[in-house]
Image (cartoon, rainbow, N blue to C red):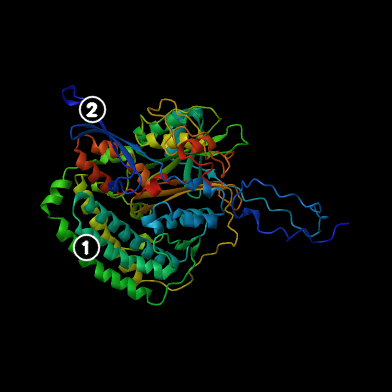
Amino acid sequence: MPEEHKPEGSEGPAPSSGEAGKSPVKPVPPAAKPAPPKAAAPAPKAPAVMAATPWESDLARDLKERLGPRVKETSTYLGQNFIVTTPDGAAPALEYLKLEADFDYLVDITAVDWPKRADRFDLVYVVYSFARNERLRIKTAIPDGFQPQSVVDVHLAANWLEREVFDMFGIEFAGHPDMRRILMPEEWEGYPLRKDYSILRQDQRWVRENLGIESGQ
Amino acid sequence: MPDATFLDSTELVLNMGPQHPSTHGVLRVILKLDGEKVLGADCVIGYLHRGVEKIAENRTYAQFNPYVDRMDYVAAVSNGLGYCLAVEKMLNVEAPPRAQAVRVILTELNRIASHLVWLGTHALDIGAVTPLFYCLREREEALKIFENYCGARLTTHAFRIGGLQYETYEGFEREVKAFCKMFGPRVDEYEELLTGNRIWNARLKGVGVLNAEECKEYGVTGPVLRAAGVQWDLRKAQPYSGYDKYDFEIPTGENGDTYDRYLVRMKEMRQAARIVEQAIEGLPEGPIMGKVPKVIKPPVGEAYVSIEAPKGELGYYVVSDGSTQPYRVRVRPPSFVNLQALDRMVRGGLIADVVAVIGTLDIVLGEVDR
């Protein structure tokens, strides 16, 4: 029956050193059955979880009052305040913040892909107020295919930032004046920053037609 | 803004770049012209897109550190500082005082080096050839300090998460002090060549105006915002790395034109040298690495941390799922956001001014495209 420690430690380099999407899967060694549990083996520690605390302030109260149930949460984590809104609450929140709370500088718009969640994407806006010297994040979870309201009419800076989110995640913004890709070629297939887009993947057809080579790698 | 062509003559569409030298890399601008007058500009970017944010998701926190240098490659030290601060924030550690001071010294030297590249190339675009040689001469001295410190001149990977890997080298203090002493008079020299020069004034004054309101609308930061009269600098507004300990000014302009942006950056170089002088005088002793675990695993959560890079606000939004690799790293690049204002700045101007405006925005395509 199985020798004691042989399969362990003879695996070669740790897999985390890169290329998570490497295609040839290593055959699983036959002796890789879980070893009989040692008495002292510690259970894998669950990662520490984001301990956001509620954010209490005049602004948080005003936001809740003005936007009602569209503001789901006002929290703070690591000294950074953020609010969570419903998908249709982000644009009104940005507008309110700009017109009535001096948050006149849209710093960034980005998204995070959580493929296992029903509401697949987190859409994140970062705004800053010169007058208050304060930064605020607005987060909203949206399902795949949902078209959030563009905020170009509130902040001109949103134009390219929303285009980049569209380019990388395939989130289309409703009412955007120029919803085209920005960094990737116009005809490229796929949205690179989605989690199901492997790091080695490329649009073979585009590469062949435009570069005249079989692969860009 | 004139949007219709004069006397219904045909609008001319002119392609500029991506190989045009004055675009400072691979920027393509599609210009709509009425004779010599610019009616609009459409930027085509992405030629240098390497998927830095995607790479981040497939590397460990420490492995990704050198990649950030390849974005704004003329200010690699600043990129590294922003990334390290973001991860440190998530780990809730702070670099020790000595590491912070060395970081400030190298970052400010890098700001000088970055501004020198801007000045040299901007002047060259406009027809003043001499400053380029002078600028590269002084930049060389700064790069030598980087090289002696960490072995690299451009993509330095100078900082580590939690502090520094290397202690300063023998003669570091002497060389940095010598640089500061040498640098002030050299800026005088550049100013002598340019500030009062009639051609320089004629080409820069009133060109590419972007006022404070427009800057905020477009999210434009850095020297461009300050030249429009907004005294805002993250080093003062939300100090990091001990910038609150140093005495320096935030230079501003009044008109928001290309000339004011030139003056602001010139003053910024002097201020940067002033900060370096103070930091090297009071360089504390002590450890250079904070208490960072061997395997970096920030708790599940997220943080947005930004610094004042030479080009403007450089931000990192990092999301952790508790594993050794970042779940998402978003870089908020100042060049990308600033470039968006190009269309507004060149509209109504002459075609020759487009070159001046691209130069004054001080973009680096590595950072625009990432």
Residue B187 is labelled as: 1
Question: Residue B44 versus residue B330: which sits nearer the camera?
Answer: B44
- Tell me if B162 is positioned left or right of B12 in this view: right
| Mark 2 secondary-structure assignment | loop
Parent chain of label 1: B
Q: Earlier in the sequence, mark 2 or mark 1?
A: 2
| Local crowd size for mark 1, using a 10 Å CA cut-off: few (<14), some (14–19), many (≥20) | some
Q: Pointer 2: what residue?
A: B11
Q: Quadrant of residue B293?
A: bottom right
**Label 2 to label 1: alpha-carbon separation:** 43 Å
Q: Quadrant of the N terminus of chain B?
A: top left
Residue B353 appears at what percent x and percent y?
21, 42
* Residue A183 higher or lower than B116, as above or below: above
Parent chain of label 2: B
Labels 2 and 1 positioned on one and the same chain: yes
Residue A23 is labelled as: none
Residue A202 appears at what percent x and percent y?
54, 40
Q: Quadrant of residue A15?
A: bottom right
Q: Residue at x 77, y 58 (%)?
A: A7
Q: Is residue B252 visible?
A: no
Amino acid identity at mark 2: Glu
- Tell me if A49 is positioned left or right of B205 in this view: right
- Tell me if A138 is positioned left or right of B230 in this view: right
| Mark 1 secondary-structure assignment | helix
* Residue B137 higher or lower than B64, as above or below: below
Amino acid identity at mark 1: Val
| Local crowd size for mark 2, using a 10 Å CA cut-off: few (<14), some (14–19), many (≥20) | some
Q: Is residue B102 visible?
A: yes
* Marker count (numbered): 2
Q: Quadrant of residue B197?
A: bottom left
Question: Residue A215 versus residue A109: which sits nearer the camera?
Answer: A215
